[in-house]
Amino acid sequence: MSENILHLDHVTMQFGGVVAVDDLTLDVNQGEIVALIGPNGAGKTTAFNCITGVYEPTNGQVSFQGQVIVENYPQGKMAAQYAGENKGMFTHRLAPTPDRITQLGIARTFQNIRLFGALTVFENVLIAKHMRAKQNFLSATFRLNQKEEQRMREESMKLLEEQGLAHLKDEVASSLPYGLQRRLEIARALATNPKLLLLDEPAAGMNPQETQELTDFIRQIREEYQLSIFMIEHHMDLVMQISDRIYVLDFGKLIAQGPPEAIQNDQRVIDAYLGVADDAEN
């Protein structure tokens, strides 16, 4: 549990005059479930987008399994911190694309489910398998590597069986009930063989029974796939039940961090968020 898998170092994301994420430093350790909470607009999804290559941060660094995967230190304040005596002269950028981040072993889901709605359950998972395939675009397109294609099909089917979705393999994804669509989206993320899974409001739109089933499901996949999980969530019952540690953002700044019991009793968190949690869900 103590081995670090994700580290954000002084990450800032600025859009014009708006600082969405402000000098954020945090860690996720191997095997942990860590939650990132805060009011709507606090910068949570922006932080996820900086990790996954959707945004290039204005400043800061993201490391995964000890390797720097995202980095931007332009001239200025952060350059001075990073470059020491070369301050004001140092500029460095590393901004891989989201597909490259996925190939490194980071998968994510989205608050608004992003399945291929016109494709079947099986096809959704198979497409994710192609993200990590060894074959190139030409062989994937023309099926020149039949052995590799067969392996991916078998692994996709096995994953659906493990997640209780095998009986739905030929169903069109958009026809599934909401809770099953969310489960399929997570299964599709698992198909990329991640080490770190980012869940962006996985319980959004779920009723209490579905939320409890999701809570059990997240625990199950953490153990079954030896995952570290970093999630954004507004449902505080789920967060408090399942998280090993919690980070709290408000207006892009980190205002608290710690185990659930400490966060629950932190007055800054209560003032900023927990006291209006019900409103934040609406």
Image: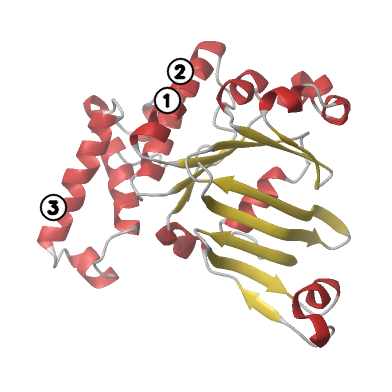
Q: Does the rendering let one see residue 24?
A: yes
Where, by quadrant of the figure, is residue 18 drawn?
bottom right
Identified by mark 1, the residue type is Phe
| Residue drawn 26% across the image and 27% down it | 168
Tell me the SS state at disc 3: helix
Identified by mark 2, the residue type is Glu
Tell me the SS state at disc 2: helix
Residue 132 is situated, as x and y percent measured from the top left of the image, at: 32, 58
Where, by quadrant of the figure, is residue 185 drawn?
top left
User: 125 or 65, which is in the foreground?
Assistant: 65
| Residue drawn 16% across the image and 52% down it | 151
Marks 1/2: CA distance?
6 Å
Residue 150 shows which numbered tag? 3
Residue 102 is situated, as x and y percent measured from the top left of the image, at: 44, 57
Marks 3/1: CA distance?
28 Å
Q: Which residue is mark 2?
A: 213
